[in-house]
Image (tube, rainbow, N blue to C red):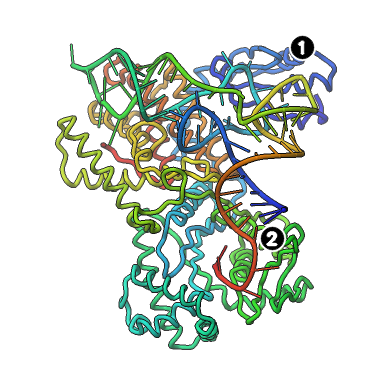
Amino acid sequence: MGDDYAGVDPLLVLSSNPKFGDYQANMAMGLAKKLGQQPRAIAQSIVDNLDVSEICELPQIAGAGFINFTVKPSYLATQLQAMQLDSRLGVAVTEKPQRVVVDFSSPNIAKEMHVGHLRSTILGDCIARVLEFRGHDVLRLNHVGDWGTQFGMLILYLREAYPQALTTADALDLGDLVVLYKRAKQRFDEDPQFQEAARQEVVKLQAKDPDTIKAWNLLCDQSRREFQVIYDRLKIELTERGESFYNPYLSSVVEDLRATGLLVESDGAQCVFLDGFTNREGDPLPLIVQKTDGGYNYATTDLAAVRYRIQTDKADRIIYITDAGQADHFAQVFQVAKLAKWIPEHIEITHVPFGLVLGEGGKKIKTRSGKAIKLKDLLDEAIERFSNLLKTRLIDEERKETEEFIANSSEVIGLSSVKYADLSQNRTSNYVFSYDKMLLDKGNTAPYMMYAYARPQSIARKGDIDFNQLGDNAQIILAEEAELTLAKHLLQLGTIITEVERDLLPNRLCQYLFELSQKFNQFYDKHSVLQVEEPIKTSRLLLCDLTAKTLKLGLNLLGIPVLERM
RNA sequence: GGGUGAAUAGCUCAGUCGGAUAGAGCAACUGCCUUCUAAGCAGUCGGUCGGGGGUUCAAGUCCCUCUUCACCCGCCA
């Protein structure tokens, strides 16, 4: 047909409705005007010149000029057998491995982690896992807020109110520290003299004054241990590289910008002005890189980080996972970094924004007394609530399980539910946090998915089957509708994972796993596995095993473990 | 005032580069456990896809406009 029409993708997409087959090609309608022919005639000539008989039935022309394809069961069986033998379940390793920096979590020292950090942490871990699985070299960076004005403020306040905290490890717990931080902030906002003194503390910190550095280290250690408890529970690995890390590079960032002529002084501060950013009054909005008092701020730090990640870490792709409210900030930082020529053409730098976590009723999430919810308490409550649900279930079903089983199941499923609730939402929109919904055993939830995994394991136990001993030559026979539906869905795994890699939208993977669980449950409900003759029995066992492996892999990419029995 | 994002079933949300009759779950109602865990399955009910205009063979999806909501807008991060 020639290169003129090469741009008329999509060549082939999944069918919008099973009754139209498995795949559909919609190009005939688009070509009709260009070629001056009837769409159905074009479709016919495409079909006439196409030989796909190895893979599917004769393509059907329908409606306005749709070409519908139905894949042959024999082809599906061949593909599934290949998938079965592959430890990666047929998901290819990327052809272009990149060095990728994923910047996520990033809590602030001396502050409690909250639900916003939870979202960044869970999304970041998932995105990192997907990229790692695809064969990229991922550097997971925790850009903790461990530097800047707030430390001058906090250290100064503690010197007056609680001096032992600055010289003795563990003199305070994090909760106390948070309270003292708030008081320090209040003092800072009200008292100009205190403000000035706090700035002097920052100067001492930046100048590496030994006493101040010691105090700072104690505060950081304290917070770091608390954060680590959360990361350990959630099984999240991160390399800490806080804002302080970039301190030695800040002055040269400003110098570089000065040298390229981007710097403008405004009200005593060093700024870069960019097109497209205005303030309330409609005046150009600066990105301030050096404050009037000579100090640096987070924009400077972020600029230093961009430069360092490209020049020293050799990143090909940098991904920032922060709330959508920081979109303007990152747009400014990226633009300045580009103007400063720190970001070569081939490097992809992306802000991956996410919406707010809201409480019931779409309002800001908080405790009954109106305080911000601590992350630890939130996780504990999910586990506690699930534990109660489980105990009720065991009584209803007259099942006896050990305390250890109940505790372990509750811990794993409770935490997984919180993760899954977050990941299954489109990250770009706000979402309403609801324990009741995330812990449901129906619908697009962690318990539903984990149960779908446990079901084939249960079959294996009952039938005394070892899935690993089914044999490499065992046949897959797809005769029943439910088997075909399940088989087709299993084979979509690779497509979905590359989509998630491209769009960084974990909810696509969640949707896939949810549909897989549904299709497995339908198959399970309709057809017996153990009570049928060979070779059907082995074929169905293979389908069970493949479903389980796919769920395990998919959940693993979400950072969610599986349970063999629930 | 400017910017960004959103508005889809009573509620919470999906919706793939524009494709055929817009999907889940919850809630409400109805069936299915002597048969691999019913944490399941099947079904009923429920929609002017915020309003209006436009582009297109085709619009929830793209463009314009209006309304409403959320978030961001100089020396905090």
Neighbor class of circle 2 (other Cα within 10 Å; few <14, some 14-19, many 20+) is few
**Residue that badge 1 annotates:** A41
Q: Nearer the viewer, residue B6 or A137?
A: B6
Q: x and y percent of residue A447 in the render?
A: 34, 37
Q: x and y percent of residue A43 in the render?
A: 73, 15
Q: x and y percent of residue A265 in the render?
A: 74, 76
Q: Is residue A557 visible?
A: no
Q: CA distance from mark 2 to mark 1?
A: 59 Å
Residue at the far bottom: name it: A210
Residue visible at 54% across and 84% down in the picture: A196
Same chain assignment for discs 2 and 1: yes
Quadrant where the image shows the N terminus of chain A = top right
In this rendering, position of residue A438 left or right of residue A191: left
* Chain ID, mark 1: A
With respect to residue A402, does A271 lie above or below? below
**Residue that badge 2 annotates:** A280
Q: x and y percent of residue A72 in the render?
A: 54, 17
Residue flagged by tag 1: what amino acid is it? Ala
